[in-house]
Amino acid sequence: MTSPPGITFFRRRGLVLLAVLAILTIYGFVAHARRERMATPASLGDQGAYLAYAQQMFDTNYAVIGPRNRMPIFPFLLSLIYQPGMSEVQFLRRAQAFNVNLSIILLLLLFFIFRRFFSASHALALLAATAFGVFLYRATNAQTEVIFYFISFCAFFLLLRMMIAPHWWLGAAAGAMLGLAYLTKASALPALGVWVAVFACQSVWQHCTGRTDRSLSPWHRLGLLLIVLGAFTAVILPYIRTSKQIYGRYFYNQSTTLVMWCDSWPEGREFLETYGPNAKWRSLPAEQIPSPAKYWREHSVSQIVHRLMRGLGDLAHLKVQVIGYYKFAALFVLAAALFWIRRPGQAGEVLGKEPFAAAFSLLFLSVYVILYAWFGAIVKDTRYILSIFLPFVFAASLFVEAMGRNRSIVVADRRFGFMPVFSTTLGGLALIDVVYNGVWDSV
């Protein structure tokens, strides 16, 4: 006797929710165990700086004006859990536990986004890969990365949707989310430039070719562009207006404005220690302030290319190990490459259905890879390149799912659908990180 369709639907939904609960429970247990086992001091990374910024916010009733290196969103959240009289160690432990708990909520929200576009099995696989391959190794520190990964992905996702089905409310949400991403980490800013360029090209192309399917008038599309820019500006305006008053630039940030145009971190640190306090660098002649123009004047083309190539090489070899994110990225690259090689015509058709969405995704990822490769001369850390992990696996999943739909593979003389096998493999790789951290917890 078969169950009615309605009962079957709720049973399946119940199993999916149970699987989500299991993944998040295991993640929470392992992450908190890792946090306690590998307790890091405030001096590691910039945890102490975030704690100090949060305490200053609390003590000044949020009137403090930071040095424009670390952005205010994460310190604001930490200020909400700060209590007067806390020692740095007490505040650090509370902040680290808070970050792990926050990451659990963010993972749940990510699953709902994944489920909107992919099957339950693939959404669960992406959840497991993100939880155990990325968040597990970042959430245990009192740093902004986990919440930035989430907010910046949401901004990418909304901007991508604007390429496919533009609407005024979607534009407002995209601009506001990108503004929050910028207030979380200044490196979110280039995403706006990439989107504006591709959206403008899409508008011109549609107008010149006379496309009518889902197209809007040039004036309508200009309005949508202004809505995105307006929402973005509205969110960040108080912050950038203060930056302009004190530092002379709306989008001033120590790392992106000054340090990244030095040859090394010691050089950047020396400049900040000498000219950073009270923005003394503003009194220097323009040719002495680190900038793209200064770097271009003082370096040959070969030196610039060498720095970039060295940075790209470092990114390719950074954290090449079975634990962490690398194996998931490699699986997606392998699957996409095989599909492209074996079925180039179909790959072209898939990308051609939404060419500007594909162009935005590729350009977005490429720009950030180049920027992080360049910044690698200053700091080598996977936390920067990991900011594009979610956009990458989301865009790659859309491509692989479109290419693998109705395809099958033979395993042990049995035929299976490609996507179920791929999703199972993706989720199975997360077990490596679970076992690795579980073994350490049992020692």
Image: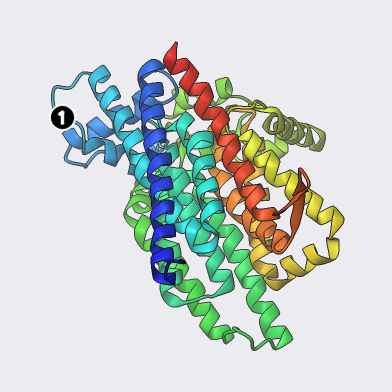
In the foreground, 58 or 20 = 20
Could you tell me the amino acid type at mark 1?
Answer: Gln
- At x 46% / y 36%, what residue is drawn? 135
Judged from this view, the residue extending furthest toward the top is 443
Q: Can residue 71 be spotted in the picture? A: no
Q: Secondary structure at mark 1?
A: loop
**In which quadrant of the rendered view does residue 70 lie?**
top left
Residue 416 x %, y %: 70, 53
In the foreground, 136 or 220 = 136
- At x 15% / y 29%, what residue is drawn? 83
The quarter of the picture where the C terminus appears is top left
Q: Can residue 217 be spotted in the picture? A: yes
In the foreground, 49 or 390 = 390
**In which quadrant of the rendered view does residue 24 lie?**
top left
On the picture, is 145 further left or further right than 300? left
Relative to 275, residue 420 above or below? below
Q: Mark 1 — residue? A: 83
Residue 72 x %, y %: 34, 42
Residue 423 x %, y %: 61, 48
On the picture, is 22 further left or further right than 433? left
Residue 218 x %, y %: 58, 84
- At x 35% / y 53%, what residue is drawn? 241
